[in-house]
Image (cartoon, rainbow, N blue to C red):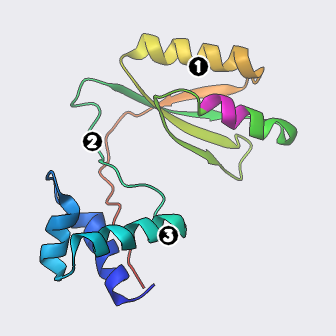
Amino acid sequence: MDDIDRKILGMIQSEFPLSRRPYRDLSDLLGLSEEEIFGRVKNLKKDGIIRRIGGSFDSRSLGFTTTLCAAKVPDNRIGLFVQEVNKYPGVTHNYLREHEYNIWFTLVVSDQREVDRLIGEIIRSTGVEELINLPATRAFKVSADFGIP
């Protein structure tokens, strides 16, 4: 990764243009061609430096219900549990943690009934019964800008 890649990463995190041709807009700002910017981003993704590029929205203000779930999953069933949970389009994060409740995931869905329905479905389809729903009581805004060394 060179200095240009670092600049691109910094801009993508906090200044990604919301336009029809964001890579052209970045190219104008950095003095490079649109193709070079796109190629560098593609390589950073291929190399695992970038996992995904996407918007971050305030789901509550858009009318969605969000919740954090935690499950106690036996070690020998983690892969299957994660695979099953990741099938649902409302799952935005799914993490293994060093905790008694070792799998944590978030759901963003239409309403509380849908949360309850999906949790029930996940319990039935995985056989993992120790799954708790931890709805947020307050909203926190966390910046996702990471320092680029």
Residue 118 vs residue 18: left or right? right
Is the residue marked by circle 2 packed among few (<14), some (14-19), or many (20+) residues within 10 Å?
Answer: few
Position of residue 122 relative to residue 8, above or below, is above
Q: Left or right: 44 with respect to 69? A: left
Query: Dot 3 lies on which element?
Result: loop
Q: Is residue 36 visible?
A: yes
Find the distance from the CA under tag 3 to the CA under tag 2: 23 Å
User: In the drawing, does residue 39 fall left or right of residue 60?
Assistant: right
Find disc 3 in the rendering and name its residue: 49
- Give whichever of 87, 62 is nearer the camera: 87
Screen quadrant of the C terminus? bottom left
Between discs 1 and 2, the one toward the N terminus: 2
Secondary element at image label 1: helix
Query: Could you tell me which residue is drawn at 61 percent across and 27 percent down?
Result: 132
Q: Is residue 61 above or below residue 129?
A: below
The region drawn magenta spans: 81-85
Q: Which mark is residue 57?
A: 2
Q: Residues within 10 Å of mark 3 (few under 14, many from 20)?
A: few
Can residue 102 be found in the magenta stretch? no
Return the residue at label 1.
Answer: 119
Residue flagged by tag 3: what amino acid is it?
Ile
* Mark 1 residue type: Ile
Contact, CB < 8 Å: mark 1 with mark 2? no
* Coordinates of residue 146 in the picture (x, y in percent): 38, 71
